[in-house]
Image (cartoon, rainbow, N blue to C red):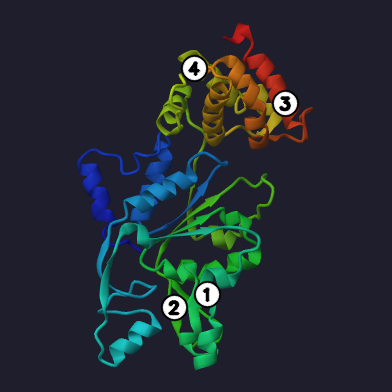
Amino acid sequence: MNLEGLQETLANYLEKSEDPLGAIMGQEEAKKGVLASILAGHHVLLEGPPGVGKTTLARHLASILPAVEAVADCPFHCRPSDPVCPACREKKDKGDTLETISIQGGQRFVRIQGSPDLTAEDLLGDIDPSMAFQYGCHDWRAFTPGKLLKGNRGIVFFDELNRIPEKLQNALLQVLEEHTATIGPYDVDYAADFLMLATMNPLEHAGVEELSDVLLDRFDVVTMGYPETALLERQILLKYGNRLDGIDFPDDSLDKLLVAVRSTREDPWGKEMDQGASVRAALALYEKAQAQAWLRGDSSVTEEHLRNVAVSTMAGRIKTSPESKYYDDAVGLVEELLQEVLSPSKG
């Protein structure tokens, strides 16, 4: 699928030497990979640890989706000249004029949150009891389309795809390959012509399922990681972190914050962890240290404020390695790390 208007929109950005995904700082190779796949009409699977910007990238992509004019006022955004849903087809067959509307880019973006309790009915649709009583349960008018079908002519963002069970993964195969969905008792196929942008957490995370080879074969896989440099991560904190009025965050305190966070991803402390602290953890520490200063009546964030909030902020956002002496003791690991990296000798 080639999303209508998106190629022209991206071309306008590039002609102006602007980054279409400029809201994402760094991640240059990942952004190029996503844009190339989207323009080629391929589904994309973003792989990486939590908190590195996968969801932010997807949301920003939704914000640049162009509006579409003159579409049918139906969940499938049918083209009046070539309707795909049963309701619009029936109207056209009767010679009725299809009412048209304009939809903004954001309305062409459907988000699905992956979870073990997600069902095929959530994705594809289900029977409306009141309509089934009126028309019969095998009549298409009794069918309410699910989120996948409502993504027709747009982008479906499937967050944490590998948290759904294998049985549900299989429900995706037809729509990703054929852009249609065959629904149980109905004798019509439903259009599901969309691009899917999905995210996946690493397999070592709790609650994730291994994606089948046949499902992975439907995606281009793009990897996202932590910010490449401390300078880039500093810029992210300053741009996206919330600031409390009247509270200063000096450069030396910000440097210590970055050292503490980035040490969880780098040796020797990185060897103790399966997952280091993410950018989300850095943002949380940046904001919470300011709150600690405010609560204590101070006007500036100090190392002491960072120490007071770092354990509660970081311990739940890292994952210790089974081989580490700190296994099942994330609090102890963070306390020991802080003792070393925030010591006077470390500056």
Residues at badges 4 and 1 in contact (C-beta under 8 Å)?
Answer: no
Q: Position of residue 340 (x, y in %)?
A: 67, 15
Instruction: Kindly report the distance in space between the C-alpha atoms of the residues bearing marks 1 and 3.
Output: 47 Å
Between 168 and 233, the one lying in front of the other is 233
Which is more foreground, mark 1 or mark 2? 1
Q: Earlier in the sequence, mark 4 or mark 1?
A: 1
Image position of 130 (left or right of 3): right
Residue at image mark 3: 333
* Residue drawn 36% across the image and 75% down it: 74
Q: Secondary structure at mark 1?
A: strand
Instruction: Kindly report the distance in space between the C-alpha atoms of the residues bearing marks 1 and 2.
Output: 10 Å
Residue type beneath disc 3: Leu
* Residue drawn 62% across the image and 56% down it: 163
Residue type beneath disc 4: Ser
Residue at image mark 4: 299
Residue at image mark 2: 190
Residue at image mark 1: 125
Residue type beneath disc 1: Gly
